[in-house]
Structures are given as structure tokens and as C-alpha cells.
Image: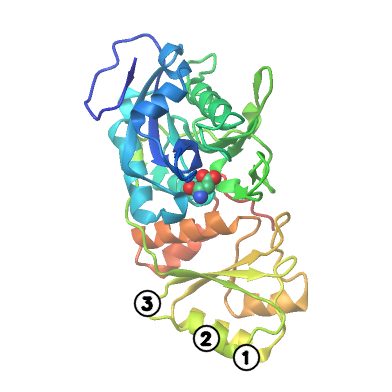
Amino acid sequence: MYICSRKKQPNTSSKMRVLLILTGGTISMVQEHKTGALCPASKEVFKAMVPELVSSSVEVDMIPFQPLIDSSDMNPDHWVKMAQTVADNYDRYDGFVILHGTDTMSYSASALSFMLTNLRKPVVLTGSQLPIGVLRSDARENLLTAIEIAAAKNEQGEAMVPEVCVYFEGRLFRGNRTTKMNSEQFEAFDSYNYPTLAKVGVHITYRENLIHRETTQMPLQTHLKIDRNVAVLKLFPGITPPVVQAILKTEGLRGVVLETFGSGNAPSYEWLYEALRDAVQRGLVIVNKTQCHTGTVAMGLYQVSLNLMKAGVLSGYDITTEALLTKMMVLMGEYSDTEEVKRLICTPLCGEMTVVN
Ligand code: ASP
């Protein structure tokens, strides 16, 4: 059965149940006949576009966001809404699929991975590069496979992928490892520093040794306070003191993602180290993230990064900017104690980074 309501119903069926949370994005759009412009499809139109939803062996319910949004308009309030919807419906479904625009999908997937702890069910984000109403659209395959993944169980009857993940164009990724890297090809996402969790062809081949599984028996916990007082400071050759100070001296700022060169290097300007040292002493958490997609920050490998370390900048290892920024926002929402935030920033919480010594 396919319903679009928030009415709570106990699961009396032996079918797997998946809740579809429709937030918007290209996947939910149809082309207006008169203007040719893309606009959100009504839930009835959406349902008519994917008749397999009704006949599927998985029971699918849907909760649409009101209104549906382009993911460029996503903000932390929307992450809270998604996390809360998963938590409110957690016991009644085997898994969750979030339909989301691709532009900021990696931010939402990363944020949700930190907001939902002790997760034992799949939360699969997917979307498409072409609207569902277009003949050559990638929407149908992405949606139907995401549902299958969200419903999949292993021989022990446990969820196959109890993580927040992104499914796109034949590949299943850990959500907090993804980056949108292509705005034209169907392969919109990549995970540069962690292998895919499953490959999808004729069969879905899960790579069980790479999938994160909670070891505690604790119930699902949500972390819904998000601190927006963070910023990204991207270094470039010729960067000037006023630009750096404009960011580091922003009122109320608590965390900075410092995007550096290569293995975590910065220009050896004395004024830069001093500005960073001063900011750290004022209580800012500054974390080094390389501008390279692949590879890790190795502070101390070169003199130019050793100085960052001396200034109190922390290593983000091989984390993505999306994951680091959202991890900061969630941790800072949860803890006012800067030392605790620093400790947890350097600790992998749900497979978002690999720490190397
Ligand atoms: N602008 C759209 C969005 O992110 C693009 C997409 O869905 O692919 O909502």
C-alpha cells in the first residue's frame, strides 16, 4: 500500500516497510508544459510516475515536506526535521529513504550521520540528475534501488546497511564520505577516501566488512541542537590578512574548517600563524582539511604544517569539508565545553574519517 500521511499505524504486515521522506530536489520535479520550467510534482503525480511503488514487495509510505524545496535552500532546521521524522517513525519501519536534491545531499547525509546515533536501520539518501518526469531520468532506478537497500536484511535478520548512506547511479556510499563532484553526468557523487559499501548491477553486492555496525544495544538517540557559528576558510596563494581576520574575528564564531594545500600545508606567513594562534587562544576550534579530494592531512610532514600544529590547529585527517563542517555544528550544539568538542572532533564517530598517526 502507498499512503501519504502522518497517521501512525502498527506494522501488522509481514512485508518490509520503508518510509519515504520526500524533501524535494530535481527528483521530485516535473516540467511545466507552458513555460518548460521545472517545478515540484504533487504527491499524486509523483506516485503516478513510479507505479512500481504500489506493486512493490516492500510496503512504502511517504511523508512529503511542505513545501518541497531545492536542496540549495536546505538549512539545519531541515536536517532537524528529517532526523525527527526518522526518530518518530523508527519503530514502525525497517528502513528510511530520503529523496533530496543533489546539490547539498552530502551536507545533509553527513549531518544526519552525527544527529542519529546508535542507528540500527538504514537511512538512504538519493535523488537524481534528471526530473522524475523526464523520459531518460535516472530517478526511477535510484529511487527503487534505494528502497530495496533500505529494506535489505542479512541472514541474522539485521539491516544490511544500518548507516546513513547515499545511493546514486549504481553505487552505495557512506553518506558522510560523499561529495557532489559532477553536475552533468549521472554519476554525481564520489567517496574519495572510503570504498563503496555496495555495488549495484544485476545483483546488489554488499561489502559487509566495510559497513559500520553499532556494537552497543543503546536505543536510537537524536542530537537536534545545531550551532551555526562555523565557517570555512579556504587558503589561496596571495590571501591577505583582512580576509583571514574578517573570518577569524567574526562575532560568536566557534569553529573553522581551514582548507589547506596538499597534505595540510599553509603559506608560511608569520601574520597567518599569529592570527590562527590568537583565534585558538580565544577558544575557536580550527581544523585542518586539505583541499585535495583524495588523501589525508599529515601535520608536521612539512615545516609549513608543523607551524599550524604549533598554533593549535587540529588535524581533520581525510574527512570531507561537508562532514567536518556538520560534525562541528552538531558537536557545538551539544557541548559548550570547547575541550570536549576538540576531543570529539579528532575522534571518528561514525566512520567519517580515518585517523593515522
Ligand atoms: N538544484 C537541485 C537540488 O539540489 C539539483 C538536484 O536535485 O540535482 O535541489
Give the residue at mark 1.
271
Name the amino acid, label 1: Trp
Name the amino acid, label 2: Gln
| Mark 1: secondary structure | helix
Quarter of the figure that contains the N terminus: top left
Report the front residue among 194 and 29: 29
Measured Cα–Cα span from mark 1 to mark 2: 10 Å
Measured Cα–Cα span from mark 3 to mark 1: 22 Å
Give the residue at mark 3.
252
Neighbour tally class for label 1: few under 14, some 14-19, many 20 plus, Cα within 10 Å = few
Residue occupying the far right of the picture? 302
Counting from the top left corner in percent of width and height, residue 317 is at 65, 59
| Residue 349 in view (yes/no) | no
Q: Residue at x 53, y 51 (%)?
A: 103
User: Measured along the vertical axis of the image, is residue 263 above or below residue 131?
Assistant: below
Q: Earlier in the sequence, mark 2 or mark 3?
A: 2
| Mark 2: secondary structure | helix
Give the residue at mark 2.
245
Counting from the top left corner in percent of width and height, residue 253 is at 42, 75
Residue occupying the far top of the picture? 14
The answer to whether the beta carbon of the residue marked 3 is less than 8 Å from any atom of ligand 1 is: no
Decide: marks 3, 1 in contact (CB < 8 A)?
no
Neighbour tally class for label 3: few under 14, some 14-19, many 20 plus, Cα within 10 Å = few
Residue occupying the far left of the picture? 7
Q: Earlier in the sequence, mark 1 or mark 2?
A: 2
| Mark 3: secondary structure | loop
Counting from the top left corner in percent of width and height, residue 245 is at 52, 86
Q: Residue at x 39, y 56 (%)?
A: 75
Decide: marks 2, 3 in contact (CB < 8 A)?
no
Q: Residue at x 46, y 24 (%)?
A: 49
Name the amino acid, label 3: Gly
Quadrant of the rendered image containing residue 264: bottom right
